Image: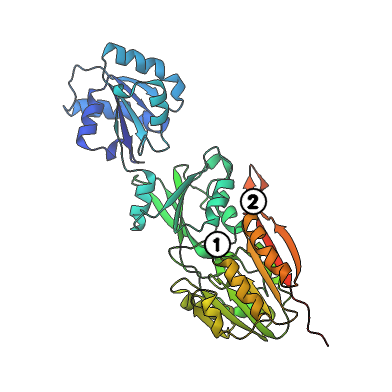
Amino acid sequence: MLEVIGTDAGGLAGLVPPSLALVRAAQLLLAPARLLAELEPWWRAEQAAGRISAGSPCPQLLASDRPELIFGAVEQALAAGRPAVLLASGDPLWFGIGRLLLQRLPAAQLRFHPAPSSLQLAFARLGRPWQDASWISLHGRDPEPLATALQKRPSALAVLTDPSRGGPEEVRRILAASGLEAAYAFWLCERLGHPAERVQRLAPGAPLPLDCDPLHLVLLIAEPPAPVTPASLPLFGLDDGLFLQHDDRPGLMTKREVRIQLLADLELPEAGVLWDIGAGVGSVGLEALRLRPGLKLWALEARGGSAALIAANAQRLGVEPAGISEGRAPEALAQLPDPDRVLIGGGGRERAAVLAAVLQRLRPGGVVVIPLATLEALAELRPPLERAGCAVAVAQLQAWRGAPLAGGTRLAPLNPVLVLKGRLPAAAD
């Protein structure tokens, strides 16, 4: 039997008594090179203390950093019935050597003794529950999956970095490229379980420690963005991370690149009424008010708690909507004044009925813009616009964001969006 024993960064000092007993009895002892140097002195000290028989020879010691070089010795020990122990980091079955062992050796010849994983230890040090956490590994991988994961705005994300490919600096660059530096606390966790472990929060732009230990991971913890001065913000095209989000659906908002296009397609007039249906966190409608303060914005969102969230975002951006309502379209539209511009966001089966209600109320020369995710939705909603006499335009928006790759930059794609636009004829003179 090969006993595979997990350790934290403290190595042997962190092992529980049953695991120590297995190590003392081993005739073949394998460990990462960082632990191997301490094994023989430790074994001699244990023997001197009487915890190992005085006549027992020191076990065979092998480094396990290159697993392909240890299988021969392991198989010989198992065939001879010699006790064998392999020390591994954390949980050997979580991004550890366990997978490789199971590919080469029968499961019946392996017994795993996991230590807390680095992920568990990191959240324990922060004192934060982690059942809602996501994780991603960048070891030997392109960083694109991290950019994709951030689009979903997880409440907590653990990143197992690759020190040979940028380490925590790579994570920082992707976070900045995603426009989310203001939305996440950045925690660097080093040597977890070692007496010299270090856990620190780094502010955006603060230098990374020059002595960053290779044994580290990064935690990204979502938090409300800090208060901002509206006058200090760009006129439009705000970073996604500047908007307050729903705690349980933090990615439910229109991304910056799409917002910019929708604001252009709405052809915002200096004055008039703008409906933002399915407003989400209010991002498009509120940016419209920054561009055209004379507009009257009516934001409608079915999700409970949305009105307070949109109002809070409006205060952050220094704008004041004419009204914010929680309700379902098309029924809730009856209480609103006739619009000059309409944005229909969200999805659902009611979309065609919502568009029909909008077209009955849209003023002459008015514009309706509908972002869509599927061709089927486009096929459903274009004909009603044409039947109403609208001039119809269709476009597809595909955007990419730069992400670091091997000292350069690669482009990570955002989800493509179809934009359907209809304009009613102007009133006759």
Q: What is the x, y in percent for residue 339?
A: 65, 82
Mark identifier at residue 413? 2
Q: Are marks 2 and 1 in contact (CB under 8 Å)?
A: no
Query: Residue at point 63% right, 48% down?
Result: 404
The answer to whether residue 135 is left or right of residue 363 is left
Question: Which comes sooner in the sequence, label 2 or label 1?
Answer: 1
Q: Residues within 10 Å of mark 1 (few under 14, many from 20)?
A: many
The CA span between labels 2 and 1 is: 19 Å
Query: Residue at point 61% right, 63% down?
Result: 255
Residue 421: quadrant of the picture = bottom right
| SS state under label 2 | strand
Query: Residue at point 49% right, 61% down?
Result: 184
Which residue carries the number 1 mark? Answer: 181
Q: What residue type is labelled 1?
A: Glu
Q: Which amino acid does label 2 sit on?
A: Pro
> On the rendered image, what quadrant is the C terminus found in?
bottom right
